[in-house]
Amino acid sequence: MLEKIRKINIKAEVDKNEYPLRSIFIASYYPRKCGIANFTKDLTTAINNLNPLALAEIIAMDDKEQGDTPYNYPWEVKNRIQRNNPQSYIDAAHYINQSSADVVTLQHEFGLFGGTDGDYLLPMLDIINKPIVTCFHSILPEPDEHKKYIMKRIIEKSSAVIAMSELSRNLLIDVYDTKDESAVLIYHGVPDFTFNENAKYKKLLDVKADKMLLVSGLIGPGKGIEYVIEAMPAILSEYPKTVFYVVGETHPDLFKDGIDKYRNYLNELVVKHHLEESVKFVNEYVSLENLIQYYKACDIYLTPHLDAQQPTSGTLAYALGAGKICFSTPYIYAKEMLDKDVGILIPFKDSASIAEQTIRVFKDETLANKYRNNAYQLGKLMQWPRVAYKYLKLFKVINEHFNE
């Protein structure tokens, strides 16, 4: 072995000029209250830890209108795109072309961009003369023609595309005609959670419950929270010291004339079923540090979402990373991630199943531990350093071959 090493010109290898790879991200960004903003912040922080000599830059998708108080972005945001201003996209493309970035990463969600289904984005992609890597946060299995057209145009302009589950990667190939070799699976990232510290964090958060159920994120009708509330009476009949926490503020797009119809509806359900002591709303946009504490405290995490086509869920990914018993309706992402006894799938809009499955795992600690351990083992594969390493590896491959 030592003889093999001695045949290598070690000095020449060490002295090679290897330049750090520079990336620029087009995405929403902190402090905007948006799942993709949080994702991009976490991802670029992890990438920067592995690539500290060329820190990632951000072009922020900005939803502020004229006269609104602007976001106080951090230093890494070098440019902004005004969502509803077509010229702003063109200006951003020219900024990218004159920048020192080696790779452009687009975080795509239809609602993030202006125009019809976000088509203001397309002229910008046509102008950019650097390699583009697109991460799709929504990959619809049955898109209408216009959404399908936009997806295919983005794919045509991208050197590689990223899906967050194998099912979603297959959709890129089967529905949107992506080449198999250009579609990459990279999981949604999660923090490096400690395991099984429920009691410690219940105490820290002053959660007065033997058992804690949790839903988190921006709140809206598609979350299916009402079905968990309606399951609570049956759960309480068996486990009266159970509390259901709903952590997160209402999605800002859902207020109409200052009225929050969905949250008012949830509050009415709580009163109707006399659950004031058993359902707790934390109606604020909590910090990541605080949110992680809620994940650590809970016993069961739920995503009872109503959209069968939902391709990803950052909140479910975090719950898996934390090693939680996860319940979910069978939308695309959940069906794959909770397979093989990682979690429990429940039918859409089925409060009785939520109650039945909750009582079942509470009664059987061996079963509960199986789900916790399986979730935590999967979560290890999704930790941010692993995800960032795979992004960087992809960037380097693309950069090396772009000009060939």
Image: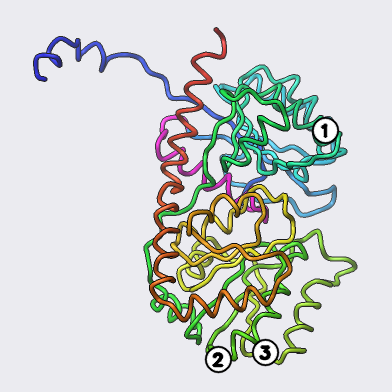
Residue positioned 76% across, 78% down in the render: 266
CA distance for labels 2 and 3: 13 Å
Which percent across, then down, holds residue 367? 43, 71
Provide the major secondary structure of the magenta segment.
helix
Q: Residue at x 50, y 81 (%)?
A: 211
Residue under the image location 55 percent in, 76 percent down: 358
Q: Which mark is residue 255?
A: none
Give SS at disc 1: loop
Within 10 angstroms of label 1, few (less than 14), some, or many (20 or more) residues?
many
Of labels 2 and 1, earlier in sequence is 1
* Mark closer to the observer (2, 1): 2
Q: Which region is colored magenta?
A: 31-54
Q: Is residue 128 magenta?
A: no
- Dot placed on the residue nearer the N-terminal end, 3 or 1: 1
Count of numbered tags: 3
Kindly identify the amino acid type of the residue bearing the numbered disc 2: Pro
Query: What secondary structure is marked by label 2?
Result: loop
Residue hosting label 2: 240
Quadrant where the C terminus is found in the figure: top right
Alpha-carbon span between mark 2 and mark 1: 53 Å
Q: Earlier in the sequence, mark 2 or mark 3?
A: 2
Q: Name the residue carrying label 1.
A: 120
